[in-house]
Structure formats: structure tokens, C-alpha cells
Image (cartoon, rainbow, N blue to C red):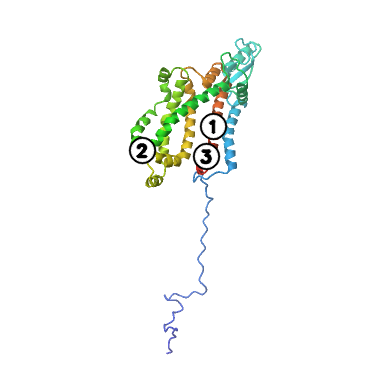
Amino acid sequence: MSAEPRTDAGRRPLPKGGATGEPALAGPLPMPPAATPVKVGARRRSWVGVARPLSSRRRTVLAVLSFLLPVLAWAAVSYVPFLWHPLVEVTEPGDVAWMEPGMRVPKAAFAKEVAGVQAAKGAVPVGIPANPVYLPAPHAVAAALWTSLTATPTQRDAIRLPLSLWHSIQIIAWGFLLSSVVGVPLGILCGAQPTLARLTEPVIEFVRYMPAPAFGALMVAILGIYDGPKIAIIVIGTFFQQVLVIANTTRRIEPLLIEAALTLGARNLRLIRRVIVPAMLPQLYRDQRILLGWAWTYLIVAELIGTSSGITFFITQQARYQHFENVYAAILIIGLVGSATDLALAWLGRRLFPYDRSEA
């Protein structure tokens, strides 16, 4: 017998069938089938996520659309005949005795009169679709706005809109100034001193839920019927919110900043004047902007207390004569003045605090 061949390592070679004795494969091992690619659908974009700053152009376009869309809806309701228009404005009364040109009547009543006149073979009334008198068209409001600002009122006891607006601005200015003189220092002290906060904030929290107009009769009894109670309502409506908001802003100052100042020897009023107030000044400025808008919301109610005055007197007088286009014009004037004031304050804030990113 011949000796079995050995490998270089002195081991016996594996049989041709492999280590397990299975028959050897005649060719190269087949490749496993390729995995079928899984089709992944397009990733859905979420409209809620991390807020990223918009481009300047996109901000401008969105700002214009925020005003343009409501105006377009208003114009559609006003000028498209088949959108709403529940009334008919009479242009020719025909043989209907109680109708007059310019009168607005419900469509059902107008149709009933038309049917009756046709049955009697008389002159049929003619009219056009119309909205209620309290919803004037945009062009009527624009014309009324221009007329109110430039023309002399036709009513005997009426006053011009610019004079009414100036009086209202004075009421707002005095009320907000008096509120800030007391509310801002008290808010800073409450935020910096926990004992004082615990002593004052519970009662302030309690009073702030009381509606400011509820104090109207009391303010008239104390301050008379002229501008005093109106200014007082602005103060009451703003002061309590002001203290709590500014106290919360003071508490948000970085504690390490205050601890470093204490380590360096700052104490009491010097700490407030040199560290706390400069650290919170940009946010305090923004808080005051917001609270000024809060004061404007109390204006109409405040001016109804005692003798009617200011732009509220103009609005109520025009509503009495059913000149609702002038009412809308006065309301738009309030919004324009408030928005212009806020934009001017925002611009000033960017100049005063260029280092503050939130004012950018």
C-alpha cells in the first residue's frame, strides 16, 4: 500500500467531498441572491419643528398677506352680489307707498311686495343686493377716513376726529405714565427681594382678576366726571399686570451674575442700579411695549365713564346717526396709531440695545 499524501503541516488533506463527507461542488459557490431594495417613500416635511429665522423677503410677503387677506375677504363680501347680501337697497320704490330710495329691506319682504305689485299690474319696485348698514364697503370706509381727518363735521355737536384722537392719546399717556412710575420700581423690587414679593404679590394677584371697568362708578365719585376717572381706569387696568410681569422678568436674570456682584461688594440699591437693571433693561423695554398695548385695550371703556370724550365720543356719536363707515374709520385709526407706536418703539429698541439678539 502506498502511503497517504500529507500536507505541508503534516496533516491529512480533506477529502474531496469536504470535511463533512458531502459531495464536492463542481464549480464556484453560487452568490446569495441580492436583497430586494426596499422602496423608501419620500420623507414628509413637518410644518412644526425648530423655529428658524425667515428671510427678509419672506417676512415682508407674509406681513403684507396678513393684512391683504382680511381686506380681500371683506371686499368679496361687499362687492360680489351672490356672497351674502341679505338685503335689497331700493332704487325705485314703484307703487309701494312705504318704500323710499336708499331704504334697505330684507329680500323676502321685497319679493313679497314685488309679487303684490305685479298682481295689481302696478309699477314694480327696483333694487340692488345690499349688505346691512353696519357693514359698509371698503371704499366707503376709506372715503370716510379721509373725510373725518380733513373735513369739518356736519353735525352740530360733533367734533373732528383728529381732536378726539389727540384727547385719547393724552389719556393713554397719562395713565400709562402714572402706572409705570409706581409699577416698574415695585416690580423690580418684588423680583429682587422674595420677602417683599411674598408681602405684595398675593394681593396683586387677587386684584388683577377684578375688571377695571368695575371701578368706574367709584372713580367718578372720587375723581369727578371728567378725565380723572378715565386715567384711573387705565392705571388700574395696567398697574397690577405690570408689577407681576416685571417681577418675573427680574427673576430671570442669571443668578451667577448677581452672585459675582455680591462677591465684589455690590449691595442693596447699588446692586439694583448697577447690575439688576442693566441686565434686565432690554426685556423690561419689551415688557413696557406689550403693556402699552394692554393700556390701549382699556381706552374705549375708560372714556365711557363720566362724560364721553375722545375718540369714544366720536364713535358713539357716529353710531347714533348710523354712519357706520365713520365708526370703522375711527376703529382703524386706533389700530394704525397703536401699530405705528409699537413699530417706532421696536425701531428705537434696536438702536438702544444693539447687543440684544431678540431686538434684531
Q: Secondary structure at mark 2?
A: loop
Image point (41%, 39%), residue name: 272
Q: Amino acid at mark 1?
A: Thr
Q: Secondary structure at mark 1?
A: helix
Tag in front: 1 or 3:
3
**From the viewer's perspective, is 293 left or right of 92?**
left
For the residues bearing labels 2 and 3, Cβ distance under 8 angstroms: no
Any mark on residue 65, and which? none
Q: Amino acid at mark 2?
A: Gln
Q: Quadrant of residue 333?
A: top right
Image point (57%, 33%), residue name: 67
Q: Quadrant of residue 232?
A: top left
Tag in front: 2 or 1:
2
Q: Nearer the viewer, residue 258 or 32?
A: 258
Classify mark 1: residues with Cα within 10 Å, few (<14), some (14-19) or many (20+). Answer: some
Any mark on residue 193, and which? 2
Measure the C-alpha gap from mark 2 to mark 3: 28 Å
Any mark on residue 352, and which? 3
Image coordinates for residue 76, horizontal then vertical, percent: 60, 29
Image coordinates for residue 247, horizontal then vertical, percent: 40, 36
Measure the C-alpha gap from mark 1 to mark 3: 16 Å
Image coordinates for residue 218, horizontal then vertical, percent: 40, 19
Classify mark 2: residues with Cα within 10 Å, few (<14), some (14-19) or many (20+). Answer: some
Any mark on residue 341, and which? 1
Q: Quadrant of residue 126?
A: top right
Quadrant assignment for the N terminus: bottom left
For the residues bearing labels 1 and 3, Cβ distance under 8 angstroms: no
Name the N-terminal-most of marks 2 and 3: 2
